[in-house]
Amino acid sequence: MRGVYLGGVGMTLFGKHLERSLRDLGSEACLKAIQESGIRPGDIQAGYCANALGAMIQGETGVGQNVFWELGINKIPIVNIENACASGSTALREGWMAVAGGFYDMVLVVGVEKAVMPKGTMLNVGAAELETKLGDVFPGYFALTAKKHMELYGTTREQLAQVSVKNHFSGILNPYAQFRKAFTVEDVLNSPMIADPLTLYSCCPNSDGAAAVLLCSKEKAKNLNLAPIKVAASVLTSGCYENGADITGWEIEKLAASEAYNMASLGPQDLNVVEVHDAFTICEIIHYEDLGLCRPGEGGRLVQEGVTALGGRIPVNPSGGLLSKGHPVAASGVAQVVEIAWHLREQAGKRQVENARIGLAQIMGGAKEGDSRACTIHILVKV
């Protein structure tokens, strides 16, 4: 395989964009990535567009063709991808494989979503699954996961709340974040109960937004006026659907992490900055453990001691994470890579992680048989 490098990146403000279309949001993020790369739209040889909810909510299909048309790009292969919350990162992996395999020298990847729903409305995802029909929706599932983690390891409600406090503090420093407001542990604990022990501020919001990255060969990267970043690992795994015996971790994530570390010839001890899928506070704590940032059961202590905060030993979700930055489903996986790139290129402003050279982005999506349907991990290295 050839080495794959990151070119320009771009994203929109995450939040409520009620008057904007999918193609409008997507083209804005793409244009930023193109402009930062200093290339012409005609230089792009293939496009990969992630969108999970367009057909369901906006009644729109073929989103990628619409987005690229707004940029004046046509007559090239354009692939539309849906893989739940891992849609954007799956599109990124498809683009990575195309460049690594020598099929193209320069491709553009974009994730775009309009997921804001009326207040109090829950996304009707996974409705075809028996568990969902029986009421096992995401807040309930992750509440059970939190309860079991608390029972087995002594994780506390205060430690869960600290994840939200940490990420909202970082979100204040991110001009692209949907919610830029500080919370205390008491604020999180006293917010409306969603599914015990998860309160409103323990859950990420549905958001509108888009993010885009340019991927290219080493030769093309040399011509860009950007600090070179190599995509050292790109991994996608699907669930084994045998997770019922232990809901305090995901084998799908442990497998992805092992493959990614082997591919990059690195380990968790080498990471400087990490972005993970914190759809609920308990998720981030478990991701610490599954990614090898700490041993099983120690995730609560890790956040309590400030290890994963800005200025800590291994900052996690300096973007504010999904909890503060927001979660436009198909855009989130690409946005994580954009955030890592900003830190590696020292463009992250007040939330900059010092001396960041190696970053990891993790996201998973969908649920089936007590497991996740998909998990992706990307490792980026500044070279």
Image (cartoon, helix red, strand yellow):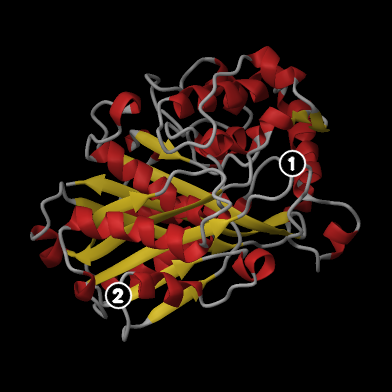
Describe residue 106's horizontal placement relative to residue 298 as left or right.
left
Query: Which residue is more in the foreground, 284 or 174?
Result: 174
Query: Which residue is more in the foreground, 181 or 156?
Result: 181
Residue placed furthest toward the bottom = 75
Residue placed furthest toward the right = 134
Whole-percent x, y for residue 382 in the image: 21, 44
Quadrant assignment, res 339: top left
Question: Which residue does the image show at 53% across and 55% down from the upper left?
Answer: 255
In this rendering, which labeled residue sits more in front, label 2 or label 1?
2
- Give me the disc on residue 142: 1
Residue type, mark 1 in image: Phe
Quadrant into which the N terminus falls = bottom left
Whole-percent x, y for residue 306 in the image: 48, 17
Assess disc 2: are there few (<14), some (14-19) or many (≥20) residues with their C-alpha within 10 Å of its C-alpha.
Answer: few
Question: Which residue does the image show at 88% across and 60% down from the upper left?
Answer: 133
Question: Which residue does the image show at 37% across and 64% down from the upper left?
Answer: 109
Question: Which residue does the image show at 44% across and 74% down from the upper left?
Answer: 66
Whole-percent x, y for residue 241 in the image: 71, 61
Report the Cα–Cα distance between label 2 and label 1. Answer: 43 Å
- SS state under label 1: helix
Describe residue 3's horizontal placement relative to residue 237 as left or right.
left
Residue type, mark 2 in image: Gly
Describe residue 158's horizontal placement relative to residue 264 as left or right.
right
- SS state under label 2: loop
- Give me the disc on residue 72: 2
